[in-house]
Amino acid sequence: LGQGVANAVGLAASEKMAEAVYNTDDHKIFGHHIFALAGDGCFQEGVSAESACFAAHEKLDNLIILYDANEVTLDKMAEYTQSEDILKRYEAYGWEVYDIDGHDLDAVQSAIAAAKASDNGKPKFIKCNTIIGKGMEETEGTNAAHGEAGVPYVDKAKVNIGIPEGEKWYVSEGTRDFFGDVQKKNQAAYDEWQATFAAWKEANPALAKQLDDAVNDNVMSSEDMIDNIPATGQSDAEATRVSGNKSIQEIARIVPHYISGSADLHGSCRNYIEDGGNFGAGFDKSYAGRNLYFGIREHAMGSILNGFAFHGLFKASGSTFLVFVDYLRPTVRVASLAELGAVSYILTHDSIGVGEDGPTHQPVETVSGLRVIPNLDVYRPGDAEETVAAMIHSVTRKDGPTALIFSRQNVDQNSDVDYKERRAGALKGGYIAKKESADLDLIIIATGSEVQHALKAAADMPGARVVSMPCTSVFDKQSADYKESVLPSSCTKRIAMEAGVSDIWYKYASKVIGVDRFGFSAPGDTVMEELGMTAENLKKEIASM
């Protein structure tokens, strides 16, 4: 509940963006309205309020919500849990509101016509007052009609509202005539639009190609992106959120329909697209802007991103601190379930390395909590080149979303391995970051900021192999031969390391160095050392095996 309202806000924002990007003075190919049907429960959910504020603030007057106000929820009548004046609430947000009889089709039609004609910068909220179970005397107007209680009375109710007895699928002649005329009218509008589109396409070949690529999700292959994006040249330690900022500029260059936004954390998450402009109304914003400011509304951000994806014209990412992702977790689950490859998440400040902000801001269970969502690829890169690969994956994946987990603190670069090799390996989810120089007798598996510790620990261990595994789900999908080449079954002495809960790593290793408790407030290096996330502790644990 509530997601449809918030998704509709995303669709409306995407439509405004499409109008600004693709319409020209001579040809208008975008300009439709977005409708959402919603009920009492939808407006009790907080996500609808978050998204309603965003819609009003950015003046999405192409959005029309029809509220089926039957004053019923599942357990009780709505009055048992709410007493607000919802029209005043939405009016206060900045919406244009209507109050009508939802059973009066002329009133419904008139309200919709007025809402569509009103280009006043306000989204439209039409409260349609209705009676649930109308015509079903036994349950009419009560919460009993919400569930199965009314099933025995359906046939009688149909007769009560004028449907011929015994007709299970009755459609009146008047209804058939109406839709016959609608088809004729729509055919004329369709033909007119096709003529306009053909003229636009001929006059704007570059825009036409960009639109065709967006609609058909045509992007450069990951292999070509590896070649097209220059080596970072990074040799000094650098936070992967900073590496991500550099990478997103390259992605935005290669994928013109890529956009990004943040829940009030552009400055910290570093996902701002330079020279991309800001989306919205007023200030320095325009609807062609590629950077969205969601305010402190993580849940709405996730739903709006899904709305963009459902609209089908833009690839959208959104950012916040990793520890706050649970605010939008339901929308991440929906994106994964709906196979929305056009959505990705940029989640920074990824571990106890956050430091002084303390345990409220130090995620320990969060990465693994995301990894258990089916069809969500979770990338936690270990250096700048792995970060490039993670960003590439997020825009080339077609069948589901990607979560990009970036560090606040600096991490060392694995400069001993060629940058293309690191990128290609990361795109397979896991690869050999350091090959043994003698007979293999130990495999160290690490991810993210812990890869640097694995490399340091293995430096004076000739028989040790280091495997960097930025994405377990992608690695698990590789061929059996590839997985065997990285993690040969003949070597059972394996240890894994991550600054997070340890459970997930036991599928790859017999011993795990993790963080199975909350952190504490201190400098990040201090917290890491105290909780065992160092090369020295890794060596100690290896020695005990």
Image (cartoon, rainbow, N blue to C red):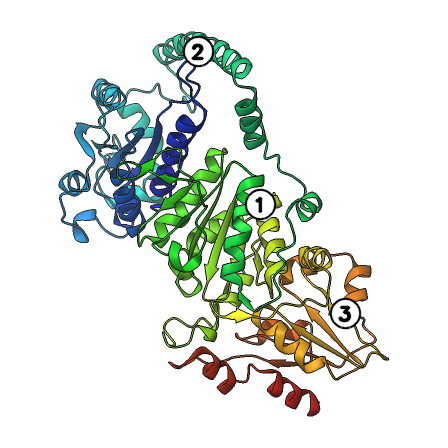
Q: Which residue is label 2 attached to?
A: 183
Q: Nearer the viewer, residue 313 or 523?
A: 523
**407 left or right, relative to 482:** left
Secondary structure, mark 2, is helix
Relative image position of residue 380 (x, y in whole percent) = 57, 63
Q: Position of residue 427 (x, y in %)?
A: 67, 55
Indicate which disc, 2 or 3, sits on the residue closer to the N terminus: 2
**Mark 3, residue position:** 487
In space, the residues marked 3 and 1 are separated at their CA atoms by: 28 Å
Q: Residue furthest right?
A: 439
Q: Is residue 341 visible?
A: no
**The image quarter in which residue 219 lies:** top right
Looking at the figure, which quarter contains the C terminus?
bottom right
Per the image, label 1 sits on a secondary structure element best described as helix
Picture residue at 22% right of the left edge, 20% below the top: 114
The residue that disc 1 covers is 395
Crowding near the residue tagged with mark 2, few <14, some 14–19, many ≥20 C-alpha atoms within 10 Å: few
Name the amino acid type tagged 2.
Gln
Q: Is residue 147 visible?
A: yes
Mark 3: amino acid = Leu
- Mark 3 or mark 1, which has the lower sequence index? 1
Q: What amino acid type should be assigned to the residue bearing mark 1?
A: Val
- Nearer to me, 528 or 512: 528
Discs 1/2, front: 1
Disc 1 from disc 2: Cα separation: 38 Å
Look at the numbered disc 3 and give the secondary structure of its residue.
loop
Return the residue nearer the eye: 307 or 263. 263
**Horizontal and vertical percent position of residue 7:** 39, 41
